[in-house]
Amino acid sequence: MGKMQIDEDQLIKMKKNVDEAKNNITQFNGQLQVLMKQLKTDWELSTVQECESQIDVFDSNLKRIDFKIEKGTEELEQTIEVKENE
């Protein structure tokens, strides 16, 4: 196989891309630290796994509340229907 020739412009572009990637990583790490601190402060959660577990709890609670609302709505509709028929 032949050697691949890289000229100075290509090297400069590659270096620029690497520098931009490093900068993005630094920014994302900073954002991650801010978000993790906010999770700890607002919800006392320290890991993604703890967040996922809490989401499951919230989801279960929401489903239970939704069921109660639906049941209460049905009972209310039946009560209204009975009173209308009196």
Image: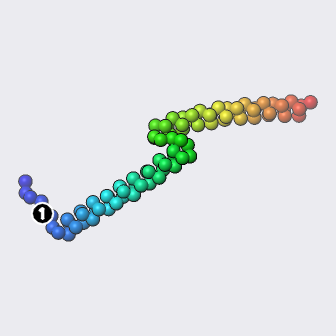
Quarter of the view holding residue 3: bottom left
As drawn, which residue projects farthest toward the bottom? 9
- Which of the two residues, 67 or 35, is positioned nearer the viewer here? 35
Quarter of the view holding residue 70: top right
As drawn, which residue projects farthest toward the left? 1
Q: Residue at x 67, y 34 (%)?
A: 65
Mark 1: give few (<14), some (14-19) or many (20+) Cα within 10 Å. Answer: few
Quarter of the view holding residue 83: top right
Q: What kind of residue is marked 1? A: Gln
- Which of the two residues, 40 or 8, is positioned nearer the viewer here? 40
**Which residue position holds label 1?**
5
Horizontal and vertical percent for residue 39?
Answer: 51, 46
Using the image, determine if residue 62 lies above or below residue 7.
Answer: above
Using the image, determine if residue 6 lies above or below residue 45.
Answer: below
Q: Residue at x 64, y 32 (%)?
A: 64
Horizontal and vertical percent for residue 85?
Answer: 89, 31
Horizontal and vertical percent for residue 26?
Answer: 36, 56
As helix, strand or loop, the secondary structure at mark 1 comes to loop
- Which of the two residues, 52 or 42, is positioned nearer the viewer here? 42
Q: Residue at x 47, y 41 (%)?
A: 46
The quarter of the picture where the N terminus appears is bottom left
